[in-house]
Amino acid sequence: RLPAFHLKPCLLAVALAGFALPAAAAQTITVGHTTSDSSHYSEGIDAFKATLEELSDGEFTVNEQSSGALGGERAMIEGLQIGTIDAVVTSTGPLGNFVPETYVLDLPFLFKDYDHARCVLDGEVGQDLLDKIGEHDLVGLAWTENGFRHMTNSQRDIETPEDAQGLKIRTMENEMHMAAFNEMGVHPTPMAFPELFTALQQGTVDGQENPISVILTGNLWEVQDRLSLTGHVYSPAIMLASPILWDGLSDEQKGWFMEAAQAGAEATRAMVSRLETEGVEELKAKGMTVVDDIDKSQFQAAVEPSYSVYTDEYGSEMLDRIRSSD
Ligand code: EAX
């Protein structure tokens, strides 16, 4: 007798099916983001894909959906919660609407420089916030990076906060950012990123603020001619997964996703660092006027009162932890 006949009928069926079927097709993981195919997020998703495919030996593959093809960041986060999207790379801009504890990360002039921000996000504060995210039908795979945000506009050179007064500036859908710009005397206009280019082109808003990579690779220089290196707020990014995807994975598979997300974050951060200097030169070459000798203390003083929007609600414990991690 063949050994297979000793198996129980159900196991026999599995054993026979194993011979009859070709290797299972790779499971495709769809990852959405709002920036372009040449952006820092896209660079990170390339590394995520390569790492995940390698670790899983082809069990998973990745389908990148760039340029807001799956909607703005807020809409995509909702998609994760209901399982219509597998994973997203997003700024923390709209995340506070879902996980209020993350608002602290978007306070202006909180992080001193890239090293400070990356160290906090990779340390205990970052881990505590990932845990909080996990309580809201979302899975935080890894902190990645958008970058320090700088102001652009089509009206005048911004050298001091007074120069920005009265301008209509698109902001992310983030209460902390809006409060800060209100204090500066600008008119903040919250809008999802995929609507921004047209709004600038049509003059619905005078300006916007984003990291160099977004201004450069999102072609915002085509519709904005003035850039001020205000660096007024660090903009973290995060790779999030849907709990519906996550709950179907084994512990080993979850480990692959976490490691791949970390590889993605490293690639993204490397590109952000490179563009912080090279990208400014490219933007100059493309015709933007760049104000690079900003007295940041003036901007910091102007937005300082907006901190109470955060501290009145959440206290200052997280702020102290972040500041003392420097
Ligand atoms: O996350 O909405 C924004 O301005 C973001 O910086 C951008 O989409 C990348």
Image (cartoon, helix red, strand yellow):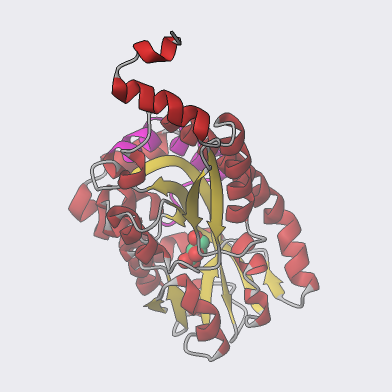
The quarter of the picture where residue 157 lies is: bottom right
Residue sticking out furthest to the right: 285
Question: Residue 257 versus residue 3: which sits nearer the camera?
Answer: 3
Above or below 10: residue 171: below
Q: Is residue 322 left or right of residue 256?
A: left
Above or below 255: residue 282: below
Does the magenta portion include 149? no
Observer able to see residue 211: yes
Place of residue 222 in the rendered image (x, y in percent of width and height, measured from the top left): 67, 80
Does the magenta portion include 116? yes
Residue sticking out furthest to the front: 1
* Rendered-image quadrant of the N terminus: top left
Question: Residue 50 versus residue 120: which sits nearer the camera?
Answer: 50
Place of residue 33 in the rendered image (x, y in percent of width and height, measured from the top left): 50, 60
Question: Residue 237 versus residue 25: which sits nearer the camera?
Answer: 25
Above or below 226: residue 114: above
Q: Residue at x 27, y 51 (%)?
A: 99
Question: Residue 20 versus residue 300: which sits nearer the camera?
Answer: 20
Report the predominant secondary structure element of the magenta stretch: helix
Observer able to see residue 252: no
Place of residue 41 in the rendered image (x, y in percent of width and height, measured from the top left): 57, 54
Q: Is residue 271 left or right of residue 116?
A: right
Q: Residue at x 39, y 39 (%)?
A: 322
Q: Which residues are magenta?
A: 108-131
